[in-house]
Image (cartoon, helix red, strand yellow):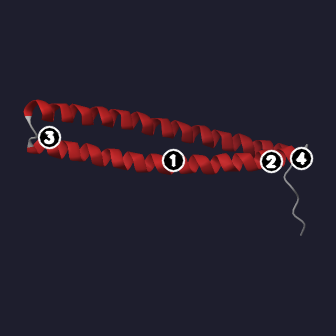
Amino acid sequence: MIEQAPSRVELLQTRLSLVGALSALNAEALKFIQTLGAIDMDRLRIEFEQERSGASEQLVRDLHEVEMKAEAVRAASAECDERIAAVEREVEAVDRLLAAAE
C-alpha cells in the first residue's frame, strides 16, 4: 500500500495542535520559574533569620527543605524544557513539510 503524504490542511491542523501544546508547555515553564522565585525568597528569608538569630535546628531543617524543593522544581523545569525542545523540533519538521508542499 502506498502511503499518501498529508495534505496542506492536515499539516496546518497538526501545526496548530503543536503550537497549542507548545503554548501550554511554555505556561508550565513560566510556573516553574515563578515557583523557583518564591522558593528563593523563602531561602533568603531563612538565611536572614539564621544571620539574625543563629542557626537553630528548625531553621537548618527549613533551609534543607527549601533547597530540596528547589532541586525538585529545577528537575521538573529541565524536563519541561526538554519537552518544549521536542515539540519545537516537531513544529520545524511540519514547517519543512509545509514549505515543500508549496
- What residue is at 80 percent from the left and 47 percent from the top? 96
Residue 30, how many percent across, how many down? Answer: 48, 35
Classify 5 as above or below 98: below
For badge 2, the amino acid type reads Arg
Residue 80 got which mark? 1
CA–CA distance in space, label 3 to label 1: 31 Å
Residue carrying label 2: 96
Say which label, 1 or 2, has the lower sequence index. Answer: 1
Residue 2, how many percent across, how many down? Answer: 90, 66
- Residue 68 relative to residue 85: left or right: left
Quarter-wise, where is residue 44 in the image? Answer: top left
**Circles 2 and 3: CB distance less than 8 Å?**
no
Which type of secondary structure does the marked residue at label 1 adopt? Answer: helix
Say which label, 4 or 3, has the lower sequence index. Answer: 3
Residue carrying label 3: 59
For badge 3, the amino acid type reads Leu
**Circles 3 and 1: CB distance less than 8 Å?**
no
Which type of secondary structure does the marked residue at label 4 adopt? Answer: helix
CA–CA distance in space, label 4 to label 1: 32 Å
For badge 1, the amino acid type reads Cys
Circle 2 or circle 4, nearest the eye: 2
Residue 101 got which mark? 4
